[in-house]
Amino acid sequence: MASGSRAHLPRTLLIDDLDALGAEVADTEQRATWLEAAGTRVTWMAVAPAVTPETSGNGSPGHGSVVPWERRAEFLRARLDEARWHRVVLASAAPGRGGLTRLLPRDAVWWPTGIAPAAGAASFREALRGVLRAGPALAPLGSPEPVDTPAALAWSAAENRAGRGAGFPLWDGDLLLLPEGLRGAAARPILAAFARLAEDWSGIDLVAWSHPALEVDENARAHGVDTRLHAVGPPRRSAEWSWWTQAAGAVLTGTSRCSSGLLLRALASGCPLLWVAPAGPAAELARWMADRGIAQCVSSDASAIAVAITRMLERVPEIEASIRAGRALAARQDPAELIVRLGARLGLEPRRRSAAA
């Protein structure tokens, strides 16, 4: 389709919830690119927990803006009123619910972009209040093709690293990554497991993508490993790739919202993954990965976790096989196929390039 006829394309409003580990406005821009290729004009709005220079964006097809969470309602209402939209799409790791859902029209569609933690042990009254605040759940894009691929991964594509450098080493030595940090009950057996193998693996440090916390420091000190635990904060995308390629492995619990792009980048980089007692959507994804030899999955037991970490550090044949399987999975998440499936689910016709192209 020639560029001059772009004005006749249907209009899509893309709302992207960036409240997930590894999510950036660059992901919103990429989704806008895919939607445009599927045959629609895109206006996007990325809702970020906090707007910083790193979330300002670099431009994308269509036009868009990054807004802070506390001003989401006023910006979203303005966007909804400015045009007649063919489709409103909410991209989010949360399962079609959340603080954005109640602001959207009922025929809006949920684009799964990751996994969210299971609800805590709230009372019935608290759970009901949460559902009422969130509004009705949005319908998802639909069953992915092939059906075997979990929706958390099927509606994302591996980022193309063509032209990227290998990146500078970010750490002087060997390390295990803790992308979700070490706060909360789910992380305690992980720290206990590391303490068990710390003496035999004296050259390994723990690097957490979280900010320092007194609770974590005290727990690490009690286990005698406080000097080997380092909280470096969430990395920018360029640094994230270097962390993945340098790490001996990464430990996940599924207690944080996690973007599918982050998982695909870990797999594409060849970083072994270990899931520890995941629950809810994370448990389904972890089991799927474990059944196919892509990742390890163990219970919340310090001994079992220590054995699994040791296997990663020793790079036993099963771990080497999981690295190959993970890279193969990331390679299968092809943007061209995703564009076709997006168009089909949203009732769009793919754009054709002009003869000059």
Image (cartoon, rainbow, N blue to C red):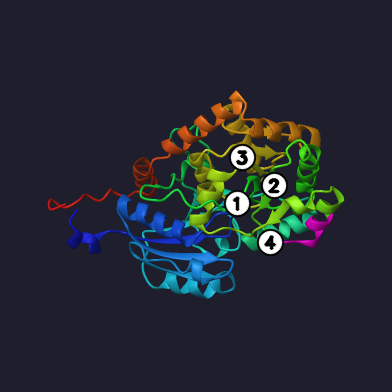
Q: Is residue 61 magenta?
A: no
Between the residue at mark 2 and the residue at mark 1, the CA separation in whole angstroms equals 10 Å
Between the residue at mark 2 and the residue at mark 3, the CA separation in whole angstroms equals 10 Å
Q: Is residue 315 left or right of residue 7?
A: right
Evaluate whether residue 113 shows in this view. Answer: no
Q: Which residues are magenta?
A: 212-218
The single residue placed furthest to the top in the displayed view is 317
- The amino acid marked with disc number 1 is Trp
Q: Position of residue 324 (x, y in %)?
A: 50, 30
- The amino acid marked with disc number 4 is His
Between the residue at mark 2 and the residue at mark 4, the CA separation in whole angstroms equals 16 Å
Q: Earlier in the sequence, mark 2 or mark 4?
A: 2
Q: Is residue 215 magenta?
A: yes
Quickly name the residue at label 2. 205
Q: Position of residue 341 (x, y in %)?
A: 38, 42
Label 4 Cα crowd, 10 Å radius (few <14 / some 14-19 / many 20+): few
Between the residue at mark 1 and the residue at mark 3, the CA separation in whole angstroms equals 12 Å
- The amino acid marked with disc number 3 is Ala
Label 3 Cα crowd, 10 Å radius (few <14 / some 14-19 / many 20+): many
The dot on residue 211 is 4
Q: Is residue 175 left or right of residue 306?
A: left
Q: Residue at x 76, y 53 (%)?
A: 227
Q: Earlier in the sequence, mark 4 or mark 1?
A: 1
Between the residue at mark 4 and the residue at mark 1, the CA separation in whole angstroms equals 17 Å
Q: Is residue 271 left or right of residue 8?
A: right
Quickly name the residue at label 3. 248
- Identify the element where label 1 is drawn: loop
- Identify the element where label 2 is drawn: strand
Quickly name the residue at label 1. 171
**In this rendering, which labeled residue sits more in front, label 1 or label 3?**
1
